Image: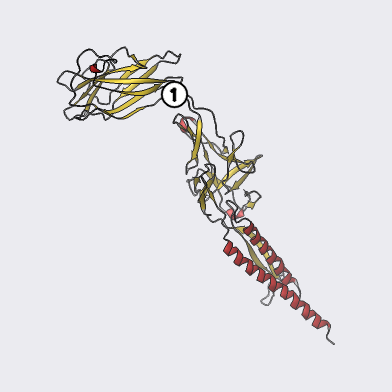
Amino acid sequence: MGYGQALSGLDASAQALDVIGNNIANSATTGFKTARAEFADVYANSLWGSSSTAVGIGTKVAAIAPIFTQGNITTTGNPLDIAINGQGFFREVSNGVTTYSRDGQFSLNATGDIVNSSGAQLTGYPAGPNNTIASTPPQPLTLSTAPVPPSASSTANFTLNLPGNATSPTGTFSPTNPTTYNSSTSMSLYDSLGNAHTLTMYFVKGSGTTPTWNVYGTVDGTALASQLGSMTFNSSGALSGVNSGTATGSTNPAGTMSLSFTPTNGSNPVNVAVSFPSSTQYGVPFAVSSNIQNGYTTGQLAGFSIGSDGTIIGNYTNGQTVAQGQIALANFTNPQGLSALSNNQFAETSASGAPVVGAPGSGSLGTLQSGALEQSTVDLTTELVNMISAQRAYQGNAEMIKTEDQVQQTLMTLR
């Protein structure tokens, strides 16, 4: 008879209370996963093998295992607060060391790197040309604050209705004489330096029996050198042809009119193809449904958003959006085999297996929610009940030691 079993029970119960205390202390820690102490019984080795009457010599803590269940997600409104909904870990790098975390509290440092509170950099896939994401190994993500360069207009699309009951105006067309045209509309075009120029289109109904409309234009109030073109419609009011210049006879409603002008500010000449998709000639007043062109001026970064697939989109003051990168996630065959570090970090081990890295939403990886955080999975009610159980176990082992002492005192007093 000895004290070994009771002492091992006291030690195991104390460690269980430590785990419970750590859980309770981290009940408000973002991304924290509840851990539990896992116990195993202990038997002494025998030279001749095990015996059916062998008595165990106590217990031990076999492992302290985190439980990787999904935590509740709460919104914060901060775009750099990111929650993982599903499996996976953020992949972070600090001084060349890669760690993993479920804590999505990030911010920007002075150089535009996305970092956590300890300065570790969030990794992902950099942006490639034309808003694409490069297929390269994950690397630290940096948000660029450089302005978007301007782009000259090259196409302009108008969807409009020309009144079928309009009468042909008299006299030679003049943009300064409203009696020489039926309707007009304007839009902004941009040159290679990002300067805006006002294009005004004038529509003049022809005098012939065929429903033809002649189109003229001015840029910044200066009339273009020649007529832009003409539009024809069928008897149902649908667009049947678009002609460029003074040509006639087109039966292609998808045709375009060519517009060219040279700004006086030193930029390149502007050449624009003007089209009129889905335009009509009905017996209702002139109306413009849409006017869209593809040029824009330079733009400054006004903000950014993060999609569920981890793509970081920069929003600019000129209305453009540019992909700045994509966050990468990593998953493991055995997440419980990860080594827990401070600052909500985990490290890869041989027990966890090698990480599987990919874009959010691919394979077994979860999706991301920007402006939200995953809360701790600690359930205080459960932990308090576990605390009572561990306390009772500790008291029981203490009573066992007391009983052992009393038995030994009885032996010592035998006569």
Residue 376 image offset from top left, x and y in percent: 57, 54
Residue 283 image offset from top left, x and y in percent: 19, 29
Element at badge 1?
A: loop
Q: Confirm whether residue 401 shows in the render.
A: yes
Position of 411 with respect to 382 (left or right) is right
Amino acid type for the residue under numbered disc 1: Ser
Question: In this view of the protein, which residue sits in the foreground, 154 or 338?
Answer: 154
User: Which residue shows up at 38% across the image and 22% down it?
Assistant: 189
Residue 32 image offset from top left, x and y in percent: 59, 53
Q: How is the image coloured?
A: secondary structure
Position of 369 with respect to 408 (left or right) is left
Q: What residue is disc 1 on?
A: 151
Position of 390 with respect to 313 (left or right) is right
User: Which residue shows up at 66% across the image and 50% down it?
Assistant: 342
Q: Quadrant of residue 22?
A: bottom right
Residue 121 image offset from top left, x and y in percent: 61, 40
- What is the count of numbered marks? 1
In which quadrant is the C terminus drawn?
Answer: bottom right
Position of 5 with respect to 218 (left or right) is right
Q: Confirm whether residue 312 shows in the render.
A: no
Q: Is residue 55 above or below residue 148?
A: below
Q: Is residue 303 above or below residue 367?
A: above
In which quadrant is the N terminus drawn?
Answer: bottom right
Judged from this view, the residue extending furthest toward the bottom is: 415
Q: Is residue 326 above or below residue 412?
A: above
Question: In this view of the protein, which residue sits in the foreground, 128 or 26?
Answer: 26
Q: Quadrant of residue 233?
A: top left
